[in-house]
Image (tube, rainbow, N blue to C red):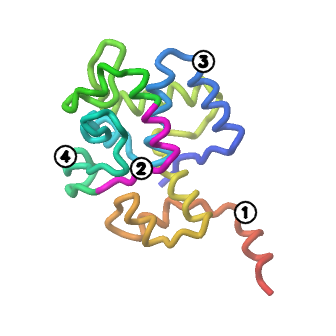
Amino acid sequence: MKQAKLLNHAEFKRLTAVIDSKRHSVRNHAVVALSFYAGLRACEIAGLHVGDVYEANGTVRDSFYLRAEQTKGSDGNTVLVNKRLAAVLRRYAAANPRHCVKPDAALIYSGKGGGFSAQTIVNLFATLYAAAGITGASSHSGRRQFVTGLADKGINPRVIQILVRHRNLNTTMVYIEAGEAKLRKAIEMVD
């Protein structure tokens, strides 16, 4: 199975610049942040409602619960919100104050007011990556980057498994990039 491309620093900067140059930049930054900073799948991003992510007073929750119908599997699970994601979600709420107080409304919505489907999220990622000149990336790249980034920082694979809501640790391990540069770095650690 071909894995979604991981973005290097320059590619992520290009992606950010493309998002900044287009309409709905705050919304699109929120979509990307949910993928890259929380490891959410396209279907999970599309399934989110305002009330899942924001308290009644409009503040960002420090965690939220994905119900079974919002996930790929048949189990619900908790998603933890880190500081980077919280900052992006605060900007999203500030840019959409009337929308982000409707708890039952879709979190991510189009210019026409309807919620995004999972396919619309996939298409948005494809459009953004194409505009940034990034080939091989997909809506799953952020999720894979999330997993690999945690692994590169030495986070226990079991902890990563729980954070990305995989039933099997082997599935999590497949996401981790182990390119030549990492292999060379590892071999140099041998005494």
Q: Kindly report the distance in space between the C-alpha atoms of the residues bearing marks 4 and 1.
A: 39 Å
The residue tagged 4 is 69
CA gap, disc 2 and disc 4? 20 Å
Measured in 3D between alpha carbons, the distance from the residue under mark 2 to the one under mark 1, in whole angstroms, is 32 Å
Query: Mark 4 belongs to which amino acid?
Result: Glu
Residue 142's x, y, as percent?
Answer: 51, 45
Q: Residue at coordinates 24% horizontally, 44% vertically from top-left?
A: 70
Residue 2 in picture, x, y percent from top left: 51, 51
If you read the primary sequence from the N terminus, does the residue marked by circle 4 or circle 3 appear first? 3
At x 31%, y 12%, the residue is: 112
**Dot 3, how many residues are within 10 Å of its Cα: few (below 14), some (14-19), or many (20+)?**
few
Q: From the image, tell me which residue sits under label 3.
A: 21
Q: Which residue is mark 1?
A: 180
Q: Which mark is residue 144?
A: none
Q: Amino acid at mark 1?
A: Glu
Q: Quadrant of residue 43?
A: top left
Q: Nearest the camera: 162 or 138?
A: 162
Label 2: state its secondary structure.
loop
Name the mark nearer the viewer: 2 or 3.
2
Q: Secondary structure at mark 4?
A: helix
Instruction: Give the mark nearer the N terminus: 2 vs 1.
Output: 2
Of all residues, the one furthest to the front in this rendering is 57
Tell me whether circle 2 and circle 4 mark residues in contact (CB < 8 Å): no
> Of the residues tagged 2 and 1, which is closer to the observer?
2
Q: Residue at x 32, y 33 (%)?
A: 58
Q: Which residues are magenta?
A: 78-90
Q: Which callout, 2 or 3, points at the residue further toward the start of the chain?
A: 3
